[in-house]
Image (cartoon, helix red, strand yellow):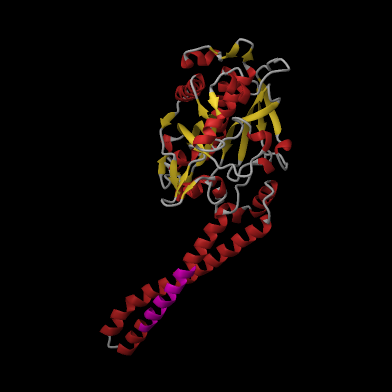
Amino acid sequence: MLTIKQITSDTETVIRGLEKKHFKNAKESIAKVLNINDQRRNVQIELDKNLSEVNSTSKVIGELIKNGKKEEAISAKDRITELKEKNKDLESEMKKAADDLRDLLYTIPNVPYECVPEGFGATDNIVEKTGGKRTNLPKDALPHWELAKKYNIIDFDLGVKVSGAGFPIYKGKGARLQRALINFFLDEALASGYTEIMPPTVVNSASGYGTGQLPDKEGQMYHCEVDDLYLIPTAEVPVTNIYRDVIIDEKQLPIKNCAYTECFRREAGSYGKDVRGLNRLHEFSKVELVRIDKPEHSKQSHQEMLDHVERLLIKLELPYHILRLCGGDMSFTSSLCFDFEVYSEAQQRWLEVSSVSNFDTYQANRLKCRYRSSTDKKINLCHTLNGSALALPRIVAAILENNQTPEGIHIPKVLIPYCGFDIID
């Protein structure tokens, strides 16, 4: 969440940033934050004043009794009792103001960087870079859901029987391709200096609030109500929360973690062509990159993550482009986000396969994820970053569609050692 210092010291910039994200009632929300914060500070001033008077009065009571000033000592004791009763009320006001302030800040999104373009949605995103070669397919090329049926590698109907729509069952070479991609992505991350984590796939509500999925995306998460646990939408949640309430030594930064997990998203309201086959699922596999860094190095970390994802797509021989997201298409928590999309020749459309984001101090403030400076020993908020490297469903879709031939579906060269075969036929 935004820090009070950020809001009070640069209020107009914060409001302009929220308006760039098209956050409704930005001015009103920030004005309310400032008002509650002023109330909290005024109560704190009065409380500190009373506590000071209690301490000073307590020190003189003994002297008054010693000097025979019994009535004055009784009056001083009565004053202390009165102040302590007032302080109970003030402490209650302080707690309420702090809770109200926190709850309000939870509902306010992160402020985008200046380099984020204006815009309302996906059509306003800027193409930063295009790479890879497009494949020339015949007019009768099949979409991946038809290829999956033809080669018996993914069974969507069987998934409906077992779990419901959006839970495909991978079979034979389809399952082996999934496993090959997971291992390839993890090996590439390890070669780039990431430490592999195998986290839980359920988290408590504190973890959801820590990374910003709660309360913003509560309706998109599967909730185990009896135990009050949430199925993770991405490994970002458990991996970043490892550093909740932690003070990190500056020498440890940047921290670089990667994790493969299953991911679960309700995707409420999704329909039409965007949900066909593997295009949008309720459960899917993903390898995630998470970085914890100091502010002055996070821009470099972000670029290194972008370079890493781009290398994966080059090695997979997929046509791709990189988008700088506009304010209206960014996530609730990000300050700067780039999306990677691969081109599906059979569907004639771009498919998002990764988002790589810098959250500045927004998540760290929620998490109380901080680092201690090696020079002045001061404690500061970290920057957090994460990115998909990569999400599998649409990668699989693009590989199947773009590499189809009359003989079968050819496997990208880099995956053959992982798959143990070079064609699906």
Q: Is residue 348 above or below residue 379?
A: above
Q: Quadrant of residue 408?
A: top right
- Residue 52: x and y in percent read 41, 71
Magenta span main SS: helix
One can see residue 275 in this view: yes
- Residue 397: x and y in percent read 60, 25
Q: How many marks?
A: 0
Q: Is residue 222 above or below residue 347?
A: below
Q: Residue at the spot x=37%, y=80% of the render? A: 81
Is 406 part of what is drawn in magenta? Answer: no
- Residue 389: x and y in percent read 53, 28
One can see residue 372 in this view: no
Answer with left or right where residue 299 lies relative to residue 87. Answer: right
Q: Residue at the spot x=45%, y=28% of the render? A: 194
Q: Is residue 137 above or below residue 6?
A: above
Answer with left or right where residue 319 lies relative to residue 298. Answer: right
Q: Quadrant of residue 276?
A: top right
- Residue 160: x and y in percent read 54, 35
Q: Residue at the spot x=49%, y=42% of the render? A: 382
Is 89 part of what is drawn in magenta? Answer: yes
* Residue, far bottom: 71
**Viewer-nearest residue: 51 or 94:** 94
Q: Residue at the spot x=60%, y=17% of the render? A: 317
Q: Is residue 145 above or below residue 82?
A: above
* Residue, far left: 66
Answer with left or right where residue 47 lies relative to residue 151. Answer: left
**Viewer-nearest residue: 208 or 1:** 208
Q: Which residues are magenta?
A: 78-93
The quadrant in which the C terminus is found is: top right
